[in-house]
Image (cartoon, coloured by chain):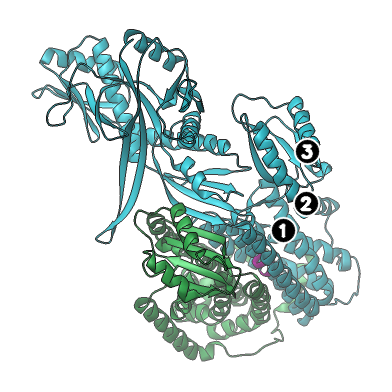
Chain colours: A cyan, B green
Amino acid sequence: MRNRYPVWVNLLILTVLAFGIIYSLPNFYGEDPSVQLSPSRNAKIDQGIQDQINKLLGDNGLKVKASELNDKRILVRFNDTDTQIKAEELLKNNMGDNYSVALNLAPATPGWLRAIHAKPMYLGLDLRGGVHFMLQVDMEAAVTQALDRYSEDIRTDLREGKIRYLSVERDKAVIQVKFQDAQTLAQGRDVIKKEIRGLVLNVLEPELTIEAKMSEPEIRDKRKQALAQNIIILRNRVNELGVAEPVIQQQGEDRIVVQLPGVQDTARAKEILGATATLEFRLVDSEHAIGPDGKAPLGARVYNDRKGRPLLLQRKIIVTGDQVVDASSGLDQQSGSPAVFISLNGAGAKKMADTTKENVGKAMAVVFIENKSETKEVNGQKLTTKKKVEEVINVATIRDRFSKRFQITGLDTTEEARNLALLLRAGALAAPMDIVEERTVGPSLGKENIAQGERSFMIGFALVAIVVLVYYKMFGIIANFTLVFNMALIMAILSSFQATLTLPGIAGFTLTVGMAVDANVLIYERIKEELRNGNSPQAAIYAGFERAFATIFDSHITNLLAAVMLFGIGSGPVKGFAVTLTIGIITSLFTAVTCTRMMVNWMYGERRGVKLWI
Amino acid sequence: MNANTKINTKTKEAAPRLYKIDFLGKRYIAVWASVILSIAAIISLGVQGLNFAIDFTGGTVVEVKFKEPADVNQIRLNLEADGFNSPMVQLFGTTRDVLIRLAPQSGVAGSDLKSRVMGILNKDNANSAEMHRIEFVGPQVGDDLVTDSGLALLYASIGILIYVALRFEYRFALGAILATLHDVVMILGFFSVLQLEFDLSVLAAVLTIMGYSLNDTIVVFDRIRENFRKLRRGEVIEVMNISINETLSRTLMTSFLTLLSVLAMAFFGGQIIHNFALALIVGIVVGTYSSIYVASALALKLGVSRMDLMPPEKEGAGADNRP
């Protein structure tokens, strides 16, 4: 008998191997220190800007290795980090107003590989250094905010329908609408039912009250929306920070992971990410006075200004922070104090124009709202308390009808003005968030981790290869070849999916070496056994592969089962391990069985009376 | 097909075996050893528990490198003076690498901690510290992780149980799962007795070992099943012994090779994956032993018989040829 694969099987195997080798190549080219420039607002990015940058760098004696332009950013590569840092400073000073400038390590993949979309693996934070945050979204607050908006809508609709009501109040998760008599109650119910979807109404006739609650699907929807919106806003904010290749992902139902490679200044990153600050513009209620007990009259609320003095504002909000289209900071031309210049969107501008037109001569207040939270341990229980800080930062007299653009002053420092502008620009969070996990890895540790990971992998691989070679001789050489292919294949798959490589991920590679070679061992031991049983070499090869396969398949499945469970726990590094291991188990089934078989066939399959060197 | 039938006729005769060790005859020694070690592990887990890392408990870890050898006691005193409750300060690797562990503090967020701690560490200007790594984990995240980990272990066990029961027989499944849990208890016991830090990566190692140890067990079971069909004569215990002996060289070879790569990880992989590698080493050693002794001995005890593994009639001769 002869052992051979049909030609098409051989071709298929060789094609897969070629894919593995080519797509793992980008990982061996290293990285260029580079600076990336992306437009932060309405700025354009085109050939002209690129030429301008190149000229600017050239004029300052900074040598550019290469410069690339695509629709989203300009990437300038340098030969060393020294030039890179100088260039970043130069570009920040000259172009920083309209562009966000960030340091980056761009893969030095040659053009022909990039042309076929071959990219190196994405390195995790533990290997490249940076900050990892996990943020918990306060879903209760998201629902409460939605209820508050519904309350406001109910008031507006009733007013517009000219239906008299006594009060609209939210009590926890229920909005209570009170009426004077049965007739208005019925009218009110019809209006609310018609105008507002998503609320479940419960009419209490004797109490002349409608109780409105959000339906379960509506609550679920609001939660999902809040998370999605927060992710979008975080993305905007991170872009404003100027970080190259950030990762922003949902984790579980109510958490978001933010990874900022290369960032070391965590304090600022946190301030920007965690801030839930937004603004509200309200009219000052000058017709009423604060009651003697500090209570506000109907339709108004008591606020404090920065010095703690109470102030009565109308309940109705003119415009909120999310209607802000653009905001920038600067100095007020008259007073020279820090100011934020704001542009509103169409709806916001119309509302603002209408309100200011009717209220010329009256005062308008800007309320700055910030959510803070702290965790305390009370009787062994962890309690997180939320504090909503609302401050009036500015009261100004409306001199004229406001247009789309206007400015606010009353901020303490230019830094504060800058941060406020940034927050307004990036939008308000749909729900407040807390940082529940933070990990910072310094850049030197990242390099050390890569070095140690690589070294341990090399040594482990070498040890296994030597033992396999000594023990299985010719078949050992074949096993070692397939091991190398297996590693290339794992790397290629990780690279194509742009999966994240972490230190435990490298450990996964090392462990896969041991596990992948197991399949070879199973086959070889079986071949040896068949030879001992007196079978001919060809029959022994045939039986070795055929009989070992069921066992290999079973054992791979069980390994896979455990590896998949790893996805369920934790984030970041351990996930990297799970990914590498899972892919490694699957690819080793291919390399250790099919590739080994092909090579054994080539070596021995066609010959009669051959002596197996095993 | 021709070749296949030829092989079958040949292997029907008693094959000359490489090893002839009476494993299962000595199973009572092994069972007692396992029982005693398991009880010891469980007692240790009950009494002193595991030394959970901040992944599970919440808190802060700071890793710094000093220019000069560091005075660990002075750092501890400085931290205490600043209001940190019983900080753990220790050297790792060299005398300049310092690891600081802080319990969860109320109302202090990560970045505030960073500047505070770095301020304290850099008090002595002559010997300044460079920040290598700071990790802050909130208490809620830790609690969730404990739940998730427990569930992952549970699901993995159930998955294994179902798979082995489907592929083999329920008594084998029970033997396999008990052998696997035996390995898990051993690793946990090892970490508990030595009070080594148990972090998320060690948990990952435990799950990996569940798969790995089972892999070994399955190879032995596969052979037992095959031999039940092939060797018409012989007691159950004899067939099992033959099977274990036949697979012995493979079991030892694979474990040895995997151990080699993991040893490289433990010695050269650096501090972060050291405990991970250690858990794997313990797991591989125990797993190899348990797949030889525990799994088969349990299946035997549960009363596996030849009939349980005979293929259904209609599959007939094709069963050996299954891909």
Mark 3, other Cα within 10 Å: few <14 / some 14–19 / many ≥20: few
Magenta portion: prevailing SS class: helix
Q: Quadrant of the C terminus of chain B?
A: bottom right
Q: Earlier in the sequence, mark 2 or mark 3?
A: 2
Q: Which numbered tag is attached to residue A16? A: 2
Residue B127 picture quarter: bottom right
At label 2, the amino acid type is Val
For the residues labelled 2 and 1, say whether their Cβ atoms are less than 8 Å apart. yes
Give B162 or B138, whichever is nearer the viewer: B138
In screen coordinates, is B74 left or right of A506? left
Residue A510 lies in magenta, yes or no? yes
Q: Which residue is mark 3?
A: A60
Residue B192 picture quarter: bottom left
Residue drawn where x is 76% and y is 53% of the image: A30
Q: Residue furthest left?
A: A206
Asked if residue B111 can be seen in this view, the reply is yes
Q: Which numbered tag is attached to residue A590? A: 1
Secondary structure beneath dot 1 equals helix
Mark 2 to mark 3 CA distance (whole Å): 49 Å
Mark 2, other Cα within 10 Å: few <14 / some 14–19 / many ≥20: some
Secondary structure beneath dot 3 equals loop
At label 3, the amino acid type is Asn
**Count of numbered marks:** 3
Label 2 or label 3, whichever lies nearer to me, is 3
* Callouts 2 and 3 in the same chain: yes
For the residues labelled 2 and 3, say whether their Cβ atoms are less than 8 Å apart. no
Secondary structure beneath dot 2 equals helix
Residue A67 lies in magenta, yes or no? no
Q: Is residue A473 above or below residue B206?
A: below
Q: Which numbered tag is attached to residue A288? A: none
